[in-house]
């Protein structure tokens, strides 16, 4: 079972991917984790990526693709996986198709108002990095972390104007993948506006049904 998780920032695809791998006994591969692993282990690709990142440049597709190709060649991917954060572009998708055949791409969707609420409502502890949400998971005392009593802050990338820009970039760069996988007959689309905390069972039934009926 080889799945690609698509969806805009704040849609919750990382959470859904985690629950999918737990049910089906497969693994999740995050592009962010892959970069950190290569940089930490000082692989040749990691060194090249770090050099570019430190210089303020974007890491080119060819480096990202080579990292992913190497990762997908490992034995723990044989039973299946969920890709989170890769591919991000059509060239990456075309390159991926050359070394692995995916079973489906699931596009997780939510109304824009829901996404804005999810992202702008987040608060992070300045001290221990625990996360809360002003609506879905509020702290016992406003502005104070339940775990360490540290100060809760709103990260700069969760301000409304920044989120608007992140969503715009997603639409321009990544959304074309939806059409790409639709044309190949591999796309499944799921609209999930419900709160995971209250409707987890119903949400995951919807996700698992989409996978099992593939």
Image (cartoon, rainbow, N blue to C red):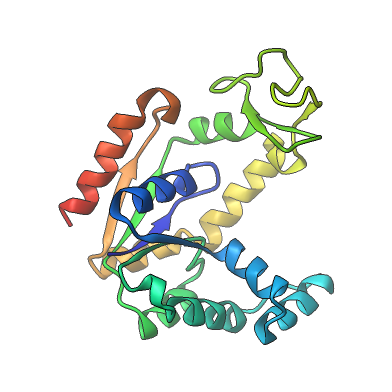
Residue at 66% x, 48% y: name it: 165
The residue located at (39%, 47%) in the rendering is 108
Look at the image and tell me whether residue 153 can be seen: yes
Image quadrant in which you'd find residue 142? top right
Residue 148 is situated, as x and y percent measured from the top left of the image, at 76, 26
- Outermost residue toward the top in this view: 141
3 w.r.t. 44: above or below: above
Residue 22's spot in the image, x, y percent? 36, 49
Q: Which residue lies at the image location 30% right of the left edge and 30% below the top edge?
A: 201
Decide if residue 53 is on the left or right side of residue 182: right
Residue 21 lies, with reference to residue 103, above or below; the image says above
Q: Nearer the viewer, residue 97 or 152?
A: 152
Q: Residue furthest left?
A: 213
The number of callouts visible is 0
Depicted 23 relative to depicted 84: above or below: above
Give how far across and how far down residue 65 sits, in percent. 53, 80
* Residue 121 seen anywhere in this rendered image of the structure: no
Front residue of this view, candidates 38 and 31:
38
Query: Split into 4 quadrants, where in the image is the C terminus?
Result: bottom left
Where is residue 90 drawn, in percent x and y? Answer: 46, 73
Q: Quadrant of the N terminus?
A: bottom left
User: Residue 182, located in which quarter of the rendered image?
Assistant: bottom left
The residue located at (48%, 42%) in the rendering is 11
Residue placed most toward the observer, 42 or 100:
42
């Amino acid at each position: 079972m080889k799945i690609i998780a698509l969806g805009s920032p704040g849609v919750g695809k990382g959470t859904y991917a985690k629950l999918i791998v737990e049910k089906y006994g497969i693994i999740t591969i995050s592009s962010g984790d892959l970069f950190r692993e290569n940089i930490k282990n000082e692989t040749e690709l990691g060194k090249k990526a770090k050099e570019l990142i430190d210089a303020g440049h974007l890491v080119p597709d060819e480096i990202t693709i080579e990292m992913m190709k190497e990762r997908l060649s490992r034995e723990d991917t044989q039973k299946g996986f969920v890709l989170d954060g890769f591919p991000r572009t059509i060239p990456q998708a075309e390159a991926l198709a050359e070394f692995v055949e995916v079973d489906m791409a699931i596009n997780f969707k939510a109304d824009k108002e829901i996404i804005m609420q999810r992202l702008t409502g987040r608060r992070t502890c300045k001290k221990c990095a625990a996360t809360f949400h002003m609506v879905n998971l509020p702290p016992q005392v406003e502005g104070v972390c339940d775990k360490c009593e540290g100060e809760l802050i709103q990260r700069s990338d969760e301000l409304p104007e920044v989120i608007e820009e992140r969503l715009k970039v997603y639409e321009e760069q990544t959304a074309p993948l939806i059409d790409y996988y639709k044309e190949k007959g591999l796309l499944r689309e799921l609209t999930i506006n419900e709160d995971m905390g209250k409707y987890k069972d119903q949400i995951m039934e919807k996700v698992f049904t989409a996978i099992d009926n593939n």
